[in-house]
Image: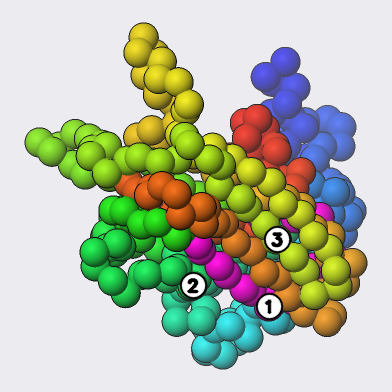
């Protein structure tokens, strides 16, 4: 079987008697590549010259890019993308592109080419953030933005954000990435402290989103377990958790989508603290689900 596959890849210039993969016209290979994912295309490019040539075709990679990819390129200096092939543009846009003082990032998913976005805590309005009695900024490699907001204690907890961006047509999910407890490294090991963690099991946090075209979504989550599981530990403490706010639909990239989102617990009958706020993610809904199930990485 291995010999047969080897013969197929040799084509008319090899020792095989019949036609092989090397005899397929590059234009036909390029046509097939339009139905494959970018990783699949790059893997097949190693087969022979025709496949390698088709894997660099602009006509192939044009279809892998979102229609408004030029808007993503406009976020970068022109010299970074001038005279690049469509394949190189896809590779460039697959890496995070910072904008708005580096507090927001947008990128293309490497497998599907769909647009994803992240917003740092520094890009949001956080009540009391400038008062060091309540909040501190903590540098960490566990955040894509290398910094998170840590809440020691507060009575009125409110985080608000807004983004206006020409997202391509799709269904998106927005979620907050949070960590209950303060983490650090000690003797090379990650440890978490729950000294300030309190108040999140009394009443839930309310998450909301709204769009300029009238879409609304809201939900509530307890950020701490109401009952401690002493045998297995409290699974909401000491780890990053993404709390889904809801979904919204984008029908067209023009006009730009304006989205507002928030999380709040403003019941002043009790204080709360010990929470790290990292970022907000805006990801195509089914893409997020595939990643959660391990279908995509």
At 80% from the left and 40% from the top, the residue drawn is 21
Determine the CA span between mark 3 and mark 2: 15 Å
Residue bearing the label numbered 2: 125
Expressed as whole percent of the image width and height from the top left, the position of residue 226 reads 48, 26
Q: Secondary structure at mark 2?
A: strand
Question: x and y percent of residue 235 in the render?
Answer: 44, 26
The answer to whether residue 199 is seen in the rendering is yes
Task: State how far apart marks 1 and 3 are (Cα).
Answer: 13 Å
The label number, if any, that marks residue 164 in the structure image: 1
Q: Give me the disc on residue 209.
A: 3
Question: Which of the two marks, 1 or 2, is nearer to us in this view?
Answer: 2
Q: The C terminus lies in which quarter of the figure?
A: top right
Q: Position of residue 17 (x, y in %)?
A: 83, 30
Residue 243's tag is none
Give the residue drawn at x 67%, y 69%.
Answer: 260
Magenta stretch, residue numbers: 158-174
């Amino acid at each position: 079987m291995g010999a047969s596959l080897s013969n197929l890849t040799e084509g008319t210039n090899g020792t095989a008697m019949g036609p092989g993969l090397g005899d397929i016209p590059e234009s036909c290979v390029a046509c097939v590549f339009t139905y494959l994912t970018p990783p699949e295309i790059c893997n097949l490019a190693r087969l022979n010259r025709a496949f390698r040539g088709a894997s660099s075709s602009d006509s192939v990679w044009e279809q892998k890019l979102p229609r408004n990819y030029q808007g993503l390129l406009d976020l970068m200096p022109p010299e970074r993308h001038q005279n690049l092939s469509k394949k190189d543009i896809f590779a460039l846009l697959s890496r995070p592109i910072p904008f708005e003082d580096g507090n927001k990032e947008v990128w293309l998913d490497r497998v599907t080419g769909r647009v994803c976005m992240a917003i740092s805590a520094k890009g949001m309005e956080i009540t009391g953030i400038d008062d060091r009695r309540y909040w501190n900024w903590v540098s960490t490699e566990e955040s894509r933005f290398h910094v998170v907001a840590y809440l020691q204690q507060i009575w009125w907890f409110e985080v608000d954000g807004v983004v206006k961006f020409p997202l391509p047509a799709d269904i998106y999910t927005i979620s907050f990435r949070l960590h209950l407890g303060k983490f650090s490294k000690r003797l090379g090991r990650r440890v978490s402290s729950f000294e300030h963690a309190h108040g999140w099991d009394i009443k839930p946090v309310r998450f909301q989103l709204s769009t300029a075209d009238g879409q609304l979504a809201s939900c509530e989550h307890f950020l701490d377990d109401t009952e401690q599981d002493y045998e297995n530990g409290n699974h909401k403490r000491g780890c990053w958790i993404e709390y889904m706010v809801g979904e919204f639909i984008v029908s067209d990239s023009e006009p730009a989508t304006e989205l507002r989102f928030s999380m709040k617990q403003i019941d002043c009958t009790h204080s709360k603290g010990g929470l790290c706020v990292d970022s907000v993610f805006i990801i195509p809904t089914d893409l997020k689900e595939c990643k959660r199930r391990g279908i995509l990485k």
